[in-house]
Image: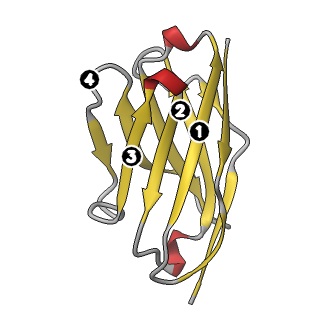
Amino acid sequence: QVQVVESGGGLVQAGGSLRLSCAASGRTWRIYRMGWFRQAPGKEREFVAAITRSAGSTTYADSVKGRFTISRDNAKNTMYLQMNSLKPEDTAVYYCAAGAGNNYEYWGQGTQVTVSS
């Protein structure tokens, strides 16, 4: 099993920055891909960004390209999401996810990000 725990959420003004962290534990050698998703009130959960554990290949949702940066520190089994130029529409619960293949099998409890206008 793999456990993932998010941290770093909070309240920030529009235009500000936050950095989210996701710490993985357990059978971390099984992890191939880690990603961030978010869910705003009344909306479905959506993909934000992903990174492969070995090559560090990254993908982003169009809505966050150029503003968010995903990275990982394999030695610490930790993934990060640097969020800059935040907008009120970025307000959501952000979830960390990890998977041994192309699917995400392991999910965190989420961390709230609120961007005030």
Q: Secondary structure at mark 1?
A: strand
Crowdedness of circle 2 by 10 Å Cα count: few (<14), some, many (20+)?
A: some
The residue to which callout 4 is attached is 55
Q: Secondary structure at mark 3?
A: strand
Q: CA distance from mark 1 to mark 3?
A: 11 Å
The residue to which callout 2 is attached is 78
Q: How is the image coloured?
A: secondary structure
Indicate the quadrant where residue 106 lies.
Answer: top right
Q: Position of residue 25 (x, y in %)?
A: 65, 20
Q: CA distance from mark 2 to mark 3?
A: 11 Å
Callout 1 touching callout 2 (CB < 8 Å) = yes
The residue to which callout 1 is attached is 22
Q: CA distance from mark 4 to mark 2?
A: 15 Å
Q: CA distance from mark 1 to mark 4?
A: 18 Å
Q: Secondary structure at mark 4?
A: loop
**Residue depth check, mark 2 versus mark 3: number of the one nearer the observer:** 2
Q: Is residue 41 left or right of residue 48?
A: right
Which residue is farthest right?
109
Q: Position of residue 38 (x, y in %)?
A: 56, 54
* Residue at 61% in and 33% down: 23
Callout 3 touching callout 4 (CB < 8 Å) = no
* Quarter occupied by the C terminus: bottom right
The one of 40 and 79 positioned closer to us in this rendering: 79
> Identity of the amino acid at label 1?
Cys
- Vertical placement of 14 versus 76: above or below? below
- Vertical placement of 8 versus 72: above or below? below
- Vertical placement of 117 versus 39: above or below? below
Q: Position of residue 66 (x, y in %)?
A: 26, 64
Give whichever of discs 4 and 2 has the lower sequence position: 4
> Identity of the amino acid at label 4?
Ala
The residue to which callout 3 is attached is 70
